[in-house]
Image (cartoon, rainbow, N blue to C red):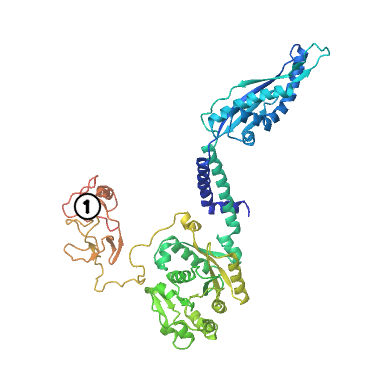
Amino acid sequence: MDFRDTVAAFRAGWFLPVIGLLLGGAAGAGMAMTMTPTYTSSTQLFVTSTDATTTTAAFQGSQFSQNRVASYVQVLTSERLAVEVVDTLDLDLTPDEVQSRIEASVVPDTTVLDIVITDTSPERARDLAEAVATQFAELVDVVEATTTTPTEPEVEPVTTVPVKVTVLDSPEIPEEPASPNLYSNIAVGLLIGLLVGLALAYARVRLDRSVRDGKVAAAAAGAPLIGTITRDRRLEHEHVLDRRSRSGNAESFRQLRTNLQFLDVDAPPRVIMVSSAVGGEGKSTLAANLAVTLAEGGHRVTLVEADLRHPRITRYLGLVDGAGLTSVLSGAADLDDVLQTYGKGSRKLSVLSAGAIPPNPSELLASSQLGALVDRLRAANDYVVVDTPPLLPVSDGSAVAVVMDGVLLSVRQGKTSREELQQARALLDRVGARTLGVVLNIAPASADPAHAYGYQGEAPTGDSDVDDDPDPAPAGRAAGTAPAAVAAEPAGATRLEQPAAEQPVAGEPSAGEPVAERPVNEPTVDLKPGMTRPIPAVRPSDAAELARGRSNGPGNGQHRAAGEPAAGPGGAGRHPGDLDGR
């Protein structure tokens, strides 16, 4: 994996570091709250030489003290000192337990000893620090004492100690526990949880063999990615999109239609098989919507339901499940007798349902009758879309692929593994079938460019399956007759009508002439006899402005009634509805 793949892995598994942070912080706080608090009390001891009568003796004594303090650290943690402390304080602790509570160190380049006592009781920590300092000083006097015996019998022996131990800081009772530190434990827990979450996110992608993006799908299938269909709840429930939908997936299917048409400009595939490596990858939904989209483009299209094991196309389109493909292949019915129609007008789609499920679907689809049926459908249609079972579980798909112009593989993101996709491509290659490309199906919304740029919408209101053939003009309409007048304008609009005192323009209805009603949203004005075009309704706030603009335009003053004064600079004498035939 390169740097970009690593970043993509962390983005895909972003929730794992978040969960790690939460769990790590909670674990740190929990440990801090359940741990027994401990307290520390400290003291310092200063070791000096007792022989400082001269400068030379003082210097030599200082050197001697520095050499000794390193050994005194071991004395402070010795068992002998611990026994003396236990006996002095009459503790219920063992010498080993006392030893474990003592920490001793030397301040660098000095003869100062630091002693830190840690205990679960603040009072006992202070008492232990005092006892250790006192007993250490006494122990040093015993260990370092030297006795000099004079040669004269009457002179008594002299005992001297070369060093002196002085307590610098008296220990105190600690007020706050030294551990646990709640905030430190939470910080450490957060850090550990974050690192573990990042490691899991990286391992999740490294160990995951499923197809996660179009680049991986195209590489595994050895074919180009020609479409991406995102997860859509409406599509999951209804399976077929509205034919006039402007949603992101509707545009994705239209883009897929365009890509198929330009795969091979000289000989574009016309008989297209839609399949997948395994089940549950949305191939039937893909086949149905692809066929509907091709028909929407004005092509003659037939959708064949060749999945004779789990047919779904007929149910998705709301058609009758009766005689179908099996009836035609077995010779029980003719093709024209079992074809059904989906949609209306010139963009309707022909559908050949699966029919009765046979006991031997593989043998039936591998028969020569299927090739003859495909040739007949090819001659009568611009495109034929065939839905088949998955390629790997059964052999039906490979039998159908032999007589197809190409195969379109549906790949479900996050479910189809790379090995399954590679095996499906190898199976198609073995039977000599052409793999047109792959469609990344049920992908997250972020994988769709239309979603990323905000080009998504809903289907317009109204029936989607409208007849594309326009209605003929109403009989009996004379040349020059005006179209219907507006029966009721939208709220806030000013009705445009001819003033009674003006002469009507040629082609406009005269006063008292009956007119037919027309839709409210399409006010029209005649250009020539029998020709109209829609104009927008004028709001009351725009009426005065329209009148002022019309007063200075060409043709001002035409068709005025006799005796009517000419329009002034402000447009007086002109009605805002006089558009001079525009």
With respect to residue 562, does 372 lie above or below?
below
Q: From the image, which quarter does the C terminus lie in?
A: bottom left
Residue at (55% x, 65% y) in the render: 416
Mark 1 nearby-residue class (10 Å; few <14, some 14–19, many ≥20): many
Q: Is residue 276 left or right of residue 114?
A: left
Q: From the image, which quarter does the N terminus lie in?
A: bottom right
Query: Which amino acid lies under the numbered mark 1 shown in the image of this protein?
Result: His
Question: Where residue 210 appears, x then y in whole percent?
Answer: 57, 62
The count of marks equals 1
Question: Where residue 424 appears, x then y in whole percent?
Answer: 58, 71
Question: Tag 1, which secondary structure?
Answer: loop
The residue where tag 1 is placed is 575
With respect to residue 82, does 316 lie above or below?
below
Who is closer to the viewer here, 374 or 419? 419
Who is closer to the viewer here, 160 or 1? 160
With respect to residue 90, does 516 lie above or below?
below
Q: As drawn, which residue projects farthest toward the right?
A: 151
Question: Where residue 214 appears, x then y in whole percent?
Answer: 55, 61
Q: Is residue 90 left or right of residue 523?
A: right
Question: Where residue 251 appears, x then y in whole percent?
Answer: 45, 62
* Visible residue check, residue 112: no
Q: Is residue 236 left or right of residue 218?
A: left
Who is closer to the viewer here, 565 or 419? 419
Q: As drawn, which residue projects farthest toward the bottom?
A: 331
With respect to residue 166, does 248 lie above or below?
below
Residue at (23% x, 62% y) in the render: 485
* Visible residue check, residue 303: yes
